[in-house]
Image (tube, grey):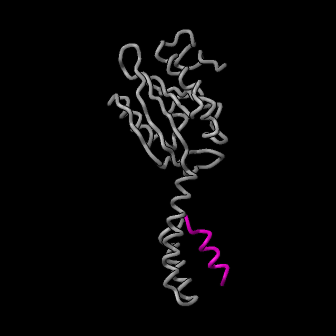
Amino acid sequence: AHSWQGTPLGALEDWPASLRTAVGIVMHSAHPMFLWWGEQMIQIYNDAYVPCFGAGKHPAALGQPGRKCWPEIWPIIGPQIEAVRSGREARWYADNLVPIWRNGRIEDVYWSYTHTPVFDEHDQVGGVLVVCTETTAQVLAERRRHTLDLLARRLLGCHDEAEVRAAIAHAAEDNPHDLLEVTLLSGAAE
């Protein structure tokens, strides 16, 4: 239903078979997928990817050049995409921090994803297929579990309130993002 005539890809009927095939794979997948095509990295993604945007980028992102849509992360993903385009080999990234603009602010978001070259009719890399899973919840849960485990170990050796406060303060210094709530609680106890 998108008006592709207004994009560098042109009308659907003029697309090469390789692009139509790749788009068919993306659109029929239940897994979040994203395709960048051509020199401008024109974006095509499926419905499963839409929740990854949060509020703000969709639906304008469809048919938009990648660099224009993702200025906040292009220094991270631009070289990754270019490595696939020039090296002609897929790349895998696990639990990679890629802070994106969504819901009105920059959010620290972790992803596991692949970048796979998609070859055109001339055996050149015409595009890059991204199959991704947001892993933010899992990464943060594991990081916080590890932090709380370290805090518990420190607290085991405490004999009085001053040592408990010192252990909490030390743990908060080592892990400022994960122990903010604990730090606030220790301050509130005073």
Q: Which residues are magenta?
A: 178-190
Quadrant of the image for the N terminus? top right
Near-viewer residue (183 or 147): 147
Identify the residue at horizontal 36%, vertical 14% (top origin). 122
Note whether 86 is above or below 24 in the view shown: below
Residue 139 lies left or right of residue 190; in this view the side is left
Q: Is residue 130 above or below residue 100?
A: above
Answer with the quarter of the image where residue 126 lies. top left
Relative image position of residue 50 (x, y in whole percent):
63, 35
Q: Give the prevailing secondary structure in the magenta stretch.
A: helix
87 sits to left or right of 66: left
Q: Is residue 180 magenta?
A: yes
Q: Quadrant of the C terminus?
A: bottom right
Q: Quadrant of residue 10?
A: top right
Image position of 116 (left or right of 8): left
Residue at 42% over, 30% down: 116
Whether 126 is drawn above or below 47: the answer is: above
Q: Nearer the viewer, residue 155 or 40?
A: 155
Extreme-top residue of the structure: 13
Residue 21 in percent (x, y) is at: 50, 17
Residue sitting nearer the eye, 21 or 83? 21
Please state the horizontal and vertical placement of residue 134, each as a whole percent of the image: 55, 44
Residue at horizontal 56 percent and vertical 69 percent from the top: 179
Residue at point 63%, 18% (across, down)? 3
Q: Looking at the image, which residue sits at the far bottom?
A: 160
Q: How many marks?
A: 0
